Amino acid sequence: MGRVAALTMIGLLVLLTACGSDEPAPCDNSHCGPCEAKVKRAVDGDTIELEDGTKVRYLLVDTPESTGGKKDCYGTEAKAFNADLVVGKTVQLNYDVQCRDMFGRLLAYVSVGGREVNSLLIERGYACVLHIPPNGTSRVDGYEQLKFAAKAAKKGLWGACETVTCEK
């Protein structure tokens, strides 16, 4: 094999390896907050509290309510799934355009063990898609596809709830 062909082959292998990686992207907009942090608790299905007390709201995700006296269908299950994934673990946080919501919570895509929690909640039927521009604009279509697939398969809340309160 010639030198140019070998270099081309190596370049293709590097590119394919990078594209197939389950690892989260490097921290974007780290001026918003930490790129990594340990999770103290799951507040509910779409919000966590870090060890330093900072609350983080998952971007593009809305789960049924389970706090403030509300007991929406599948809210408790969404909170438990979220807690099982992240509590006591170090997570990676990636930010979008706006850093915080009107309640002062950080807005982020959260990954643990190479898997993005935001998309897992949608894919497994624990959440609806909530797009509040400008955040999430580049990812909303993919999240909608995950929701449609979960809904068609009657996963999670789509099969268990007569009324899905997070769907607007």
Image (tube, rainbow, N blue to C red):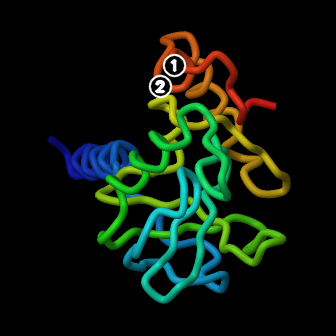
Residue occupying the far left of the picture: 1
Give the residue displayed 45% in from the left and 31% down from the top: 124
Residue 107 % position (x, y): 67, 67
Residue 69 relative to residue 91: left or right: right
Q: Is residue 85 above or below residue 141?
A: below
Instruction: Kindly identify which residue carries mark 1.
Output: 160
Instruction: State the CA–CA distance, disc 2 to disc 1.
Output: 6 Å
Q: Depth check: 128 or 146 in front?
A: 128
- As drawn, which residue projects farthest toward the top? 152
Secondary structure, mark 1, is helix
> Mark 1: which amino acid?
Ala
Q: Quadrant of residue 164?
A: top right
Q: Which residue is mark 2?
A: 156
Give residue 100's quadrant in the image: bottom right
What residue is at 78 percent from the left and 73 percent from the top? 103
Q: Residue at x 51, y 35 (%)?
A: 126
Does 64 sit left or right of 131 as displayed? left
Q: Report how many numbered discs are placed on residues in the image.
A: 2
Q: Secondary structure at mark 2?
A: loop
Q: Are marks 2 and 1 in contact (CB under 8 Å)?
A: yes
**In the picture provided, is 42 more to the left or to the right than 139?**
left
Task: Name which residue lies at 52% across and 83% down.
Answer: 34
